[in-house]
Image (tube, rainbow, N blue to C red):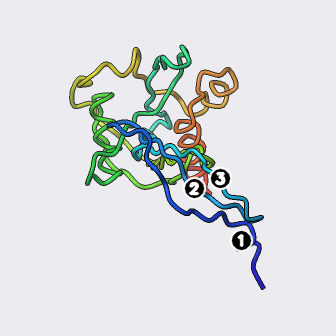
Amino acid sequence: MATNEERSRWVVHGERLIYDNRWIRLGLVDVEIPDGERFEHHAVHLDRAAIAVVVDEQQRVLMMWRHRFLFDRWGWELPGGLVDAGEDPMETAAREVEEETGYRVKEIEHLVTYQPMAGMVDSEHNLYLARGAELVKEPSGEIEADLIEWVPMKEIPDMIARGDIWTSGTLVGLYAARDRLNGERG
């Protein structure tokens, strides 16, 4: 007898690449759903991302005030970026913190890995908790943020409620870090 998982599994018969560049790969996937219907479904493939929640001894989070052109919207975000080929995502998270903020993390550990849009988009996000950081230089590379600030964790819920924090990696990272830190305090 088939399990519920087996009864609801989609079968992939292949994928045809229709667009490919450094940032995005778009394909049409030949799928068959459980009732036997077969059709093409779009699939978007993006490189993996690594994001860091950097928390200091005063329970503040290192955040960046950024503009996102696609939505013409400002918001507070955590430092992070795309994982280079062959790079460990934890190294990416630490590197991105330093490049984007000028801070070098002291300790870093994995929090959670998730897919923000699992229906059509493959975009693995790896989130890390960094404890402590030291300012070692000015941010480098392209300008990532208008402001870089240490935000008290107790202010985060109000910032989310106001819509000042709205991107998935930042939201998931902050909630996961809060739960990890609260669990350690018992």
Tag 1: amino acid: Glu
Q: Tell me, for residue 5, which label it has, or none.
A: 1
Q: Secondary structure at mark 3?
A: strand
Earlier in the chain: of badge 3 and badge 2, it is 2
Q: Which residue is mark 3?
A: 39
Q: Which residue is mark 2?
A: 30
Mark positioned earlier in the residue sequence (2 or 1):
1
Q: Is residue 52 visible?
A: no
Q: Nearer the viewer, residue 136 or 165?
A: 165
Tags 3 and 2 touching, CB below 8 Å: yes
Residue 161's image quarter? top right
Instruction: Name the residue located 43 percent from the left edge and 31 percent from the top edge.
Output: 62
Q: Looking at the image, is mark 3 or mark 1 earlier in the sequence?
A: 1
- For badge 2, the amino acid type reads Asp
Provide residue 35's location: percent of width, then percent of height.
Answer: 77, 64
Against 128, residue 34 (above or below) is: below
**Residue 20: image location, x then y, percent:** 37, 40
Circle 2 or circle 1, nearest the eye? 2
Kindly give the residue lying farthest to the bottom in the view shown.
1
3 and 101: which is toward the camera:
3
| Residue at figure coordinates x 28%, y 38% from the top left | 104
Q: Which image quadrant for residue 82? A: top left
Q: Closer to the camera, 93 or 34?
A: 34
